[in-house]
Amino acid sequence: MRIAVFASGRGSNLQAIHDATLANDLQGVSLALLVCDRPDAPVVEEVKKRGIPAFIFSPQDYADKKDYEIVISEKLKTAKIELVVLAGYMRLVGSVLLEKWEGRMINLHPSLLPLFPGIDAIGQAWRSGAKETGVTVHFVDAGMDTGQIFLQQKISVDPEDTEVSLAKKIHSLEHQLLPKAIQKFQQEM
Ligand code: GRF
């Protein structure tokens, strides 16, 4: 199964997915394309080192979302992508991609959705005083973190936790859960 990852930042989840494919933890999965909307994002350097093909664009070079999503669609088609994985892609997906990829596009979110959608989900959970939080992988729809939940895992917020230690726990959980979700998609969908 050929997958594309969309990312805008660090790319630690892209690295976790790629490592899993190399270690054969994700058998039969090939990370065939990065789509990135920020040419200066660290993930761009990372895919260069790893030899992963990339489409890197600046949204301001296009008239609107529709325009750049048409180009992304073509790139996905050429790369024969079967599943799109949003891992820190800091944009709402528009109608061009949603129409083509509904049911084949998943997003990673660092909370137990429907709790704490949107930005700074870890900080939101921390400030709420919740005793547990977690990570969600869900199908993408037109809303912000609103699509059908595909896989979720909880962790406890312990008395000795700080916001920083909680963020670390969440990120390492993400690095495990996202490859698991891709495997589940491959087996079930
Ligand atoms: C992750 O916490 C993900 O849940 C959120 O953005 C972050 C991306 O991290 N949507 P990275 O770029 O994969 O390191």
Image (cartoon, helix red, strand yellow):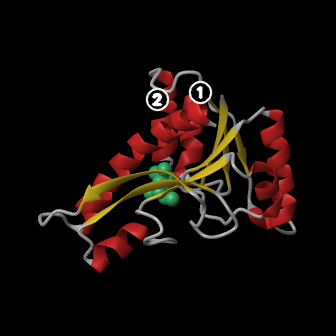
Which amino acid is tagged 1?
A: Val
* Label 2: few (<14), some (14–19) or many (≥20) C-alpha neighbours in 10 Å: some
In which quadrant will I find the C terminus? top right
User: Which residue matches tag 1?
Assistant: 29
Question: Where is residue 63, by image quadrant?
Answer: bottom right
Question: Where is residue 99, by image quadrant?
Answer: bottom right
Q: What element carries label 1?
A: loop
Mark 2 and mark 1 residues within 8 Å of each other at the beta carbon: yes
Q: Is residue 139 above or below residue 130?
A: above
Q: Pick whichever, 170 or 152, lies toward us.
A: 152
The residue drawn where x is 66% and y is 49% is 105
Q: Where is residue 69 in the image (x, y as percent from the top left)?
A: 81, 56
Q: What element carries label 2?
A: helix
User: Which residue matches tag 2?
Assistant: 20
Q: Position of residue 73 (x, y in %)?
A: 82, 48
**Spatial separation of the CA atoms under disc 2 and disc 1:** 9 Å
The answer to whether residue 61 is seen in the rendering is no
The residue drawn where x is 25% and y is 76% is 129
Q: Looking at the image, which residue sits at the far front? A: 188
The answer to whether residue 169 is seen in the rendering is yes
Question: Where is residue 2, by image quadrant?
Answer: top right
